[in-house]
Image (tube, rainbow, N blue to C red):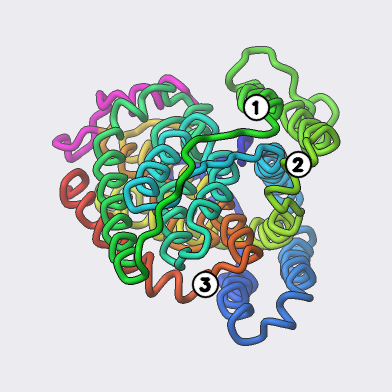
Amino acid sequence: MAACSTPLFAAGGHEAAAIQLPPVWLVIPFVLLLLMIATGPLFYHRFWEHNYPRVSLGLASFVAVYYGFMMDHGWHVLEHTLEEYLSFIALVSSLFVVSGGILIRIERRGTPLVNGMLLAFGAVLANLIGTTGASMLLIRPFMRMNAGRLKPFHVVFFIFIVSNIGGGLTPIGDPPLFLGFLKGVPFFWVISKVWLPWLLTVICLVSVFMLLDARAEKSEGAEKSAERGISIIGKTNFVYLGIIIVSVFLDPAVINGFPSLQELFHLPLGIRELIMFGVAIAAYRTANPDALGGNEFNFEPIKEVAFLFVGIFATMIPALELIGAYAATHAAEFSVTTFYWMTGALSGVLDNAPTYLNFLAGALGKFGLEMTDPQHVIEFASGKASSIEGDVQSGVYLMAISIASVFFGAMTYIGNAPNFMVKNIAAQSGVNVPDFLEYVYKYSVPVLIPVFGVLWFLFFNY
C-alpha cells in the first residue's frame, strides 16, 4: 500500500513544466526488469531463481543513483518512493504472516459449485480485509479442497477474482481506492457507484470458471467427500488481522492531528507501518505451530515480492514521471474512454496506486479542479463538476479510473502484490502454474479483455 502517495504531477501543464523530466532511455531498466520477470522462470530458470534479488536491486540502484545525482528533484522523489515501498511492504508482509498462522480446513471436495461459491465469498471478503488478506487466507484452503485435480486455471481465476477484482468496492479493498479516500473521495462512494460493474464482472468470471471446472470434473470423474464441515486453527490471529485493518486508517489525512513520523522525525515510515511490522513479528512468534505446519508456511513468497517490488518501485519512477507529465498536459483532450483504457493498461504493469493518482489529477484538471483540495475531490466525485463537454458527469471519470486501476491489476503477475504471492504458494505446492507470458496470452487477454470491453461499452463509452 502506498498510503502516503502523491501524484508526481498535479493537474495542469504549468506544474509539469516546472519539474525536470527524466530522459526517455531511463525507462529501459524498468522494461528490462519486466522482460526478465517474464522470461527468467521460462528460459533461464536456474540463473533467475538464484539471482533475481541481485538483478532487481542492481536495476533499482542504477535508477536511484541517476536520480540522486542527475535530477534536480531526485532525492525528494527517492525519499517519497522509499516511503511508498515501506508502506506497501508493511501491509502485505503483515497480512501474509498473520494469515499464514490461520489454518482453515474445509472438509469438502472441491466441485464447480463449491469452488465458485468460495471464489465469490473471497471477492466479498477482499473488500473487508483487502485483496492481500483475502488471498492469503483462502488460497491454501482452496488448493486443499481441490488436491489432486488442481489445474492452472484454478490458480489463475483465484488471482482474477480474489486477488484483484474482488477488492473493487471499498477503500480497504485495494490501495488506489484507499488513496482516493485519503484525497477526499467519500468512503462509501465506491460501493454506491461501482457495485453494478463489480457484480457483473464477478458473476461473469465465476460463471466462466465454473464452466471450465465442470468440464475438468467431467473429464477426470467426480469424487465425493464423506465429511463436511469447516475447522479453524489459530483463531487468535483474527485479532491481529483486525489490528492491521484498523491501523490502515491511522493517517493524518484521515484523523486530524494524528502524528506523522515523517514530518516529526523525517523517518521514511509512520506509526501505521510500525504497528504493521510489529504485528507481523508478534503474530509469527505466537503462531500456532499446527497452523504454520498445516499451511506449510515459509517466507519465500514474501521474499520474492519484497525483492522484485523494490526493483519495480524504483525503476518505474521515470515511467511514472513521463506518464504524469503527459496526463497533466493532455488531460483536456482525454475522454472517459481514454482515461479508462490508459489507466487500466498502465495499472497492469505499473504500481496501480500512483497510476490512479496521476490520472485522477488529470481528470480533476479537466474540470478545473485541484486534487490538493478535498472539497474539489468531493465535488468531482458527486458528479456536480462541469467541463467543456458538459454532457458527461465528472463522477463517470472517477468510476472509470477506479475500476480500471483495480480490475486491470489482474492482467499480469506484477499488476498486484497478491498475484505473485499466490503464484509462489501454488508453485511450492507442486501446482502447474502458468509462467508470466502464458498467464497473459492464455488467460488474461482472452478472458479479461472481452469482459473489460463489455464494461467499457456499458458504462464508459463516452
Q: Residue furthest bottom?
A: 43
Q: Is residue 256 left or right of residue 180?
A: right
Q: Residue furthest top?
A: 257
Q: Residue furthest front?
A: 226
- Helix, strand or loop for disc 3: helix
Residue at image point 63% right, 58% down: 425
Q: Neighbour class for label 3 at 10 Å: few (<14), some, many (≥20)?
A: many
Q: Is residue 93 left or right of residue 457?
A: right
Residue 369 in sight from this viewpoint: yes
Residue at image point 69% right, 43% down: 100
- Alpha carbons under labels 2 and 1: distance apart: 16 Å
**Three-letter amino acid code at the position of disc 1:** Phe
Instruction: Identify the disc placed on residue 238.
Output: 1
Residue at image point 29% right, 54% down: 338
Name the one closer to the observer, 275 or 421: 421
Q: What is the quadrant of the N terminus in the image?
A: top right
- Helix, strand or loop for disc 1: helix
Determine which residue is flagged by label 3.
Answer: 436
